[in-house]
Amino acid sequence: GAVVSQHPSWVICKSGTSVKIECRSLDFQATTMFWYRQFPKQSLMLMATSNEGSKATYEQGVEKDKFLINHASLTLSTLTVTSAHPEDSSFYICSAEEDPDEQFFGPGTRLTVL
Amino acid sequence: AQSVSQHNHHVILSEAASLELGCNYSYGGTVNLFWYVQYPGQHLQLLLKYFSGDPLVKGIKGFEAEFIKSKFSFNLRKPSVQWSDTAEYFCAVNAGDSRYKLIFGSGTRLLVRP
């Protein structure tokens, strides 16, 4: 099956700094990628839909100025958490679409903000 | 708003026992339904999906699910579980004008005892 990678897998940062998370589709091109957030013992919540070459579409309640998404190529989308605070600590997961209606998920990135 | 409910948050079974995990969704129109599995330390993987046709869907690793439209349900089943089925299982739906947006249930943690 299609493979999606994320980097880094775990990041610790100080409050007020920015963190960039990369999502790559390794063996296919993805015009659409998705970013999810997963709180401990809870489900995945869609944050935004990232389309190559255009602006991301954010879900209601997600601050687009805080969670910057860039989808610069057909194999790479990045999520930058700006001015991170402890409440941003979470597990961030991306997915990429190879075919319509089938998303392949990355392994996730655990962000801890001190 | 669309929602997905998984009523069993934790399930503990012995090997060879039968499994049924409940999933109900709220949406009156056409839906696509998915079951994903997340093994410990691994990323989400697709178990099976339903788009149309035969409401009994067979997936990988001996899993199957039945779409019952009148009950808005898409329960996951396996006749005989193995220790290696220990994982978290997520039901998800996309529907209507949210064509590519996956709405996830809260997940069910399954522990299979040897």
Image (cartoon, rainbow, N blue to C red):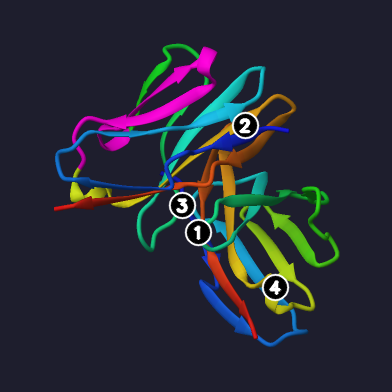
Residue at numbered disc 1? A41
| Spatial separation of the CA atoms under disc 1 and disc 2 | 22 Å
The chain ID associated with circle 4 is A
| Spatial separation of the CA atoms under disc 4 and disc 3 | 30 Å
In this view, B92 is above or below B50: below
Q: Nearer the viewer, mark 2 or mark 3?
A: 2
Position of residue B76 measured from the top left corner of the image (x, y, whole percent): 37, 31
In this view, A100 is above or below A80: above
Of the numbered discs 4 and 1, the one sitting upstream in the chain is: 1
Q: Which mark is residue B78?
A: none
Q: Amino acid at mark 4?
A: Glu
Whether discs 4 and 2 lie on one chain: the answer is no
Q: Nearer the viewer, mark 1 or mark 2?
A: 1
Residue at numbered disc 4? A87
Whether discs 1 and 2 lie on one chain: the answer is no
Q: Which mark is residue B94?
A: 2
Residue at numbered disc 3? A3
Q: Where are the magenta residues, as a range?
A: B60-81
Whether the residues at callouts 1 and 2 have beta carbons within 8 Å, the answer is no
Residue B25's image quarter? Answer: top right
Say which of A47 and B6 sits in front.
Answer: B6
Instruction: Name the secondary structure under disc 1.
Output: loop
The chain ID associated with circle 1 is A
Of the numbered discs 4 and 3, the one sitting upstream in the chain is: 3
Q: Nearer the viewer, mark 4 or mark 2?
A: 4
Instruction: Name the secondary structure under disc 2.
Output: strand
